[in-house]
């Protein structure tokens, strides 16, 4: 086990599968103590067992990330288990593919609550403790859809991720003098359960738009999260880092 994040008490939301699970496992591999989160308790228990089998400490909180009480329980669990909160990874999120003219009002509300308001809630719950410590790291999971229009995502998804980028910059500006670093990660096309359902024709279309000619993996994103949580990125503040194989550059 690496010691790059040894002693780092980290909360990772939406970590029962996909990118969030890859981040939780990578943090554990590098020595972090974890609080994982999701809505599927069975999946959380299995991941907790896997992480503990790696020699890392791990607790979990199950609940709707769009509810403030879930954010409160995450902070309380981390403090109770480890006595501090060093890193918050706001990974939990959802996507949809409605055209604007077909988008239900309820879907707009659901998307912003899950993708954006949830990050505000978790930050509200952990930042006071980071201020007391005079240190901390917040990593917000955004998307290239937050920077440019995406043909395969609802407008509310792009708006929610653009909001994450703005939240990241404002928090970074306000909190940096207190020793708290805030950054975002903007993944592009990543191999997930959903991408397994693509037709061969659509997969080839996606590949052809990526200069590296492959999809990203959860580990590609997790490696960037580990870097941002470590002292290796000590002078990086307020950035929204693209992880997309060159599909979108800015």
Image (cartoon, rainbow, N blue to C red):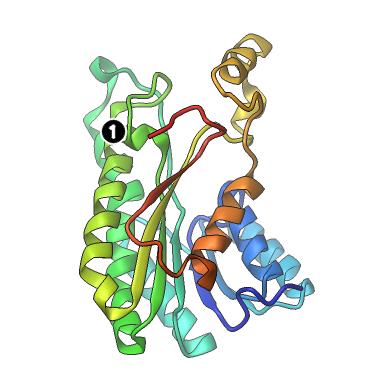
Q: Residue 67, how many percent across, how many down?
A: 32, 60
- 141 displayed left or right of 1: left
- Is 41 placed above or below 98 here? below
Q: Residue at x 26, y 72 (%)?
A: 175
Look at the image and tell me whether residue 219 can be seen: yes
Q: Residue 133, how many percent across, how many down?
A: 36, 88
The quarter of the rendered structure image containing the N terminus is bottom right
Q: Residue 41, how many percent across, how many down?
A: 59, 61
**Is 20 or 4 nearer to us in this picture?**
4
Q: Residue at x 38, y 58 (%)?
A: 183
Look at the image and tell me whether residue 16 can be seen: no
- 94 displayed left or right of 106: right
**Is 177 or 6 nearer to us in this picture?**
177
Q: How many badges with numbers are in the image?
A: 1
The quarter of the rendered structure image containing the C terminus is top left
| Quarter where residue 249 is shown | top left
Q: What residue sits right under mark 1 in the picture?
A: 156
Q: Which residue is farthest top?
A: 201
Disc 1: CA contacts within 10 A as few (<14), some (14-19) or many (>=20): many
- Is 203 placed above or below 162 here? above
Q: Residue at x 24, y 49 (%)?
A: 166
| Quarter where residue 161 is shown | top left
| Quarter where residue 173 is shown | bottom left
- 124 displayed left or right of 145: left
Q: Residue at x 58, y 73 (%)?
A: 34
- Is 243 placed above or below 175 here? above
Secondary structure beneath dot 1 equals helix
Q: Residue 193, how many percent across, how many down?
A: 63, 35
């Amino acid at each position: 086990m690496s010691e790059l994040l040894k002693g780092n008490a980290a909360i990772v939301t939406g970590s029962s599968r996909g990118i969030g699970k890859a981040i939780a496992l990578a943090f554990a591999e590098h020595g972090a103590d974890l609080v994982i989160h999701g809505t599927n308790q069975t999946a959380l228990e299995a991941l907790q067992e896997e992480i503990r089998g790696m020699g890392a400490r791990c607790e979990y909180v199950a609940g709707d990330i769009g509810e403030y009480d879930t954010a409160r329980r995450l902070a309380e669990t981390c403090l109770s288990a480890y006595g501090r909160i060093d890193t918050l990874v706001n990974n939990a999120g959802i996507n949809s593919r409605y055209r604007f003219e077909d988008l239900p009002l309820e879907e707009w509300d659901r998307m912003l609550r899950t993708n954006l308001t949830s990050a505000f809630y978790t930050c509200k719950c952990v930042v006071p403790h980071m201020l007391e410590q005079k240190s901390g790291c917040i990593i917000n999971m955004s998307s290239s859809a937050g920077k440019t229009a995406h043909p395969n995502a609802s407008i509310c998804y792009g708006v929610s991720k653009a909001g994450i980028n703005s939240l990241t910059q404002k928090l970074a500006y306000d909190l940096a003098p207190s020793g708290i670093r805030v950054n975002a990660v903007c993944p592009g096309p990543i191999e997930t359960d959903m991408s397994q359902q693509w037709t061969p024709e659509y997969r080839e279309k996606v590949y052809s738009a990526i200069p590296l000619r492959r999809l990203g993996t959860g580990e590609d994103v997790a490696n960037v999260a580990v870097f941002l949580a470590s002292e290796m990125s000590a002078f990086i503040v307020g950035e929204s880092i693209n992880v997309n194989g060159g599909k979108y550059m800015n």
